[in-house]
Image (spheres, coloured by chain):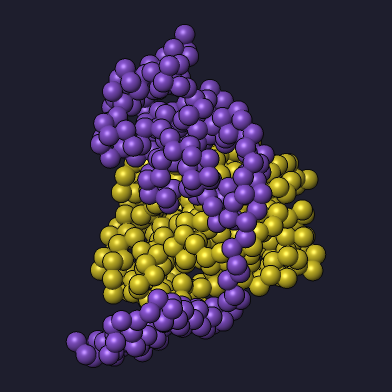
Amino acid sequence: MSNQGDEDNKGHPQDAGVYSNAQAIGEGDFSLTRRELIKAGAATAATAAVSAKATAAFAGETPVTPAPEILPLRLKVNGEVRQLAVDTRTTLLDALRENLQLTGTKKGCDHGQCGACTVIVDGRRINACLTLAVMHQDAEVTTIEGLGTPDNLHPMQAAFVKHDGYQCGYCTPGQICSSVAVLKEIEAGIPSHVTLDLVSPPQMTADEIRERMSGNICRCGAYSNILAAIEEVAGGKKS
Amino acid sequence: MKAFTYERAATPADAAASAKQHPGAKFIAGGTNLLDLMKLEIETPVHLIDVNGLALDKIEPTAEGGLRIGALVRNTDLAADERVRRDYAVLSRALLAGASGQLRNRATTAGNLLQRTRCPYFYDTNQPCNKRLPGSGCAALGGYSRQLAVVGASDACIATHPSDMAVAMRLLDAVVETVNPDGSERHIPVADFYRAPGNTPHLETVLAPGEFITAVTLPPPLGGTHIYRKVRDRASYAFALVSVAAVVQPDGTGRVALGGVAHKPWRMEEADAQLVHGAQAVYDRLFADAQPTPENEFKLTLAKRTLASVLTEARA
């Protein structure tokens, strides 16, 4: 075990620094003042920063992380122009949820794997978690709140209710935004992985809908009901 | 996510020049891979140059009869382009086999070429990884390597390149066009674009610091039958275990490139020359120097069978 520990210290000098600070806090007196605690914390942070600097220099990159930058941003969300001031690190998802309190759009994985954050930006569905808000100056964003209201449901929302296209409901706003966009993509002639003939327009089939919805995960497994809901709206469009 | 400063570039040359002025800067277009990595602090740019406003979103015919694809053309638009669907179907198919509809709507042509490996040890900052932290070692070599490279790798790195699109681009002899911070331009065949991992797996392409991709050009159409076959753990929205891109002519000649097996799209012109002799001959040439791990040895069998299946389909 100790051998393993030695190796760890050699491999990760920054960890050694953290441990020594922790030790300094622990030794003798537990009644540290808040100021002393902050000092110790700052020393830890400084050690980590130095390590990061050494690492970055090795990779040939600049080490200095700048202070957070706040920028003004104008978005048109659900038809309404909104002025914001956002940290450049703010994703579109966090801008919607935290800055604009539009919490209908959900944060699932936050890494573009689950589709819970799907919104429609300038007519296209995207993962709001994998794009920065500042990259969307003057963009038109439609969230689940902009598709319909409880008193006036969008046809896709009504179809999800009718077909029980959910269980817990957490993925549902993303599923519905995605569904609405999927039908438009098929209508626009955009092919998919399952489109057999690339040179003809894709057909509105269950296979096409399933493939195109693969970026929206439903952990409750309501897929067959989700498909039924989308097919109903698609059928209505065809006639 | 670490803090960064942010600017919107006005021209490609400005973007390249700004990258040189800001060591540690990154270009951001779709952001679908970069932001994922920034959240995990695997990528820690101190400055982001947003290139989305640049007019590089057109697909135009070239004088030679090919297509010039702007760096910012989204994967959805490239896959849906009528000319691409008709004349470069293997490219459409490869794009449509990758990611999800939401991601393809954002991901760009240049960004797709530059996406990073999905090796689990590259993503796990608690593990050594020579690509993420040069000199720290490779946890994948003795670890979970099922998804990783079987050929072209090194003792320092067995990561695979994750792109489907790049496999088709390599097959089609696409050329990457760039602009440098000094304003000079360069044309780099995709064949020469990716570096072998060797002892420096953190250096993935031949791009110089600040060098900015403006377009990818395709030579005139090849004709023939176009196939992209992707074998993965589920039917949609997963990275390839093995993929085969092929263009086969009526006389049985043609070309193949494989994804999911190496640090870059895996194609050899000498292997293409074996196409008339069948899948085994092509496979023997492509994988003569294969060095699989016990966990990913199955990829060799899978590659051989997928090649055979694709060639059978092409000749049917």
Q: Viewer-proximal residue, A35 or B117? A: A35
Q: Viewer-proximal residue, A106 or B75? A: A106
Q: Is residue B112 above or below residue B199?
A: above
List the single residue furthest toward the top: A239
- Image location of residue B232, percent across then percent down: 34, 49
Task: Give the left or right position of residue B132, taking residue A162 as reference.
Answer: right
Q: Is residue B313 above or below residue B217?
A: above
The residue under the point 26% across, 31% down is A167
Q: Count the numbered circles shown.
A: 0
- Image location of residue A49, percent across then percent down: 50, 79
The residue under the point 34% across, 25% down is A227
Q: Is residue B4 visible?
A: yes
Task: Give the left or right position of residue A192, taking residue B222 as reference.
Answer: left
Image quarter hosting the N terminus of chain A: bottom left
In the rendered structure, the colour chosen for chain B is yellow
The residue under the point 56% across, 30% down is A78
Residue A7, by quadrant, is bottom left
- Image location of residue B162, percent across then percent down: 45, 57
Q: Is residue B98 visible?
A: no
List the single residue furthest toward the right: B183
- Image location of residue B45, percent across then percent down: 58, 66
Q: Viewer-proximal residue, B125 or A42? A: A42
In the rendered structure, the colour chosen for chain A is purple
The residue under the point 60% across, 38% down is B77
